[in-house]
Image (tube, rainbow, N blue to C red):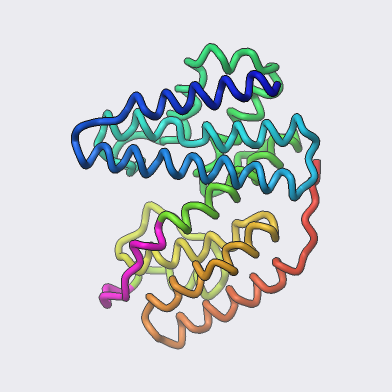
Amino acid sequence: MEELLAQLHQWMADYMKSFYNEDEKIQAAILLKEEHTGYVTEISRELAAHLRLNPHDRQLAELMGLFHDIGRFRQFTLYQTFNDAQSEDHAALSVKVLHELPLIKKLSAEDQELIFFAIANHNKKAIAPARDKRKLFFARLLRDADKLDIYRVLSPFLAPSTGGGFAPGFLAKFIAGEQVDYTRIQTQDDRKLVRLMWVYDVNFSWTLQRIGERGYVDRIIACLPDTPEVAEGAQRLRAYMAAKCAATDTADF
């Protein structure tokens, strides 16, 4: 597995560089996703180690991080956007690209299915039902690794509220600690609430501890309108984070 892992890393590095472009907009987008890929790969590796997975499963987690956004490179080249609604589901595209990779077939059929399932579900509102607990576990691990780095990626783009308000029902969902339908986002403040509500979908205390320590949540809240409703939702969110961060992580499969 070590030799194959090295081969897959080299293939991915070459694949990402094959999308380099003289167009500044395209090049910036490709470099953004190349950097994100590196971070998610490392986070997946670290989280797997924290959960004390065996060496084989740690390598699987690493591969999931490495390939989770492989479809993004083709997506932006074809559509000039990372917006799935305006192009195609980048997770499904990632699985499609992986199926085209001969090297991936050197993995066992079971390992391939674990990787495909985790990647297909890393961007969904909820993980698809599955009887296989290993599939669900690795999907949760990858979703956490991806979210942790997305907070980093989006942090520089935060800006104070412009007073655009919230889409109907968004603020009520935030106060209740519930997820919202991403397709109903209308304002920049809606986007901020969605990012805050990702917290309720974080699976491991290890991940949430790092989200808190790095100040991502506090910075988002500071960029929302200073209203009693936002304060109520923020209070609930912080209480949830404190309780979740105190929990002990386990590899439950």
The one of 181 and 26 positioned closer to us in this rendering: 26
x then y, percent, for residue 70: 45, 31
In the displayed structure, does residue 95 sit left or right of residue 139? Answer: left
Answer with left or right where residue 190 lies relative to residue 65: left
Furthest residue in direction left, as rendered: 23
Residue at 74%, 45% (x, y): give it. 49
Q: Is residue 120 above or below residue 240?
A: above
| 33 lies above or below 13 | below
Magenta run includes residue 179: no
Foreground residue, 23 or 147? 23
Query: Which residue is at 54% across, 55% downward?
Result: 148
161 or 59: nearer the viewer:
59
Name the residue at 30% across, 30% down.
20
- Specify the principal SS of the magenta part: loop
The percent coordinates of residue 117 (x first, y second) are 60, 32
Q: Quadrant of residue 62?
A: top right
Quarter that holds the N terminus: top right
Q: Quadrant of residue 80?
A: top left
Residue 222 on image: x %, y %: 42, 78
Above/below status of 174 relative to 251: below
Q: Position of residue 184 (x, y in %)?
A: 36, 57
Q: Which residues are magenta?
A: 154-165
Q: Residue at x 49, y 67 (%)?
A: 216
User: Quadrant location of the C terminus?
Assistant: top right
Residue 129 placement, left or right of 152: right
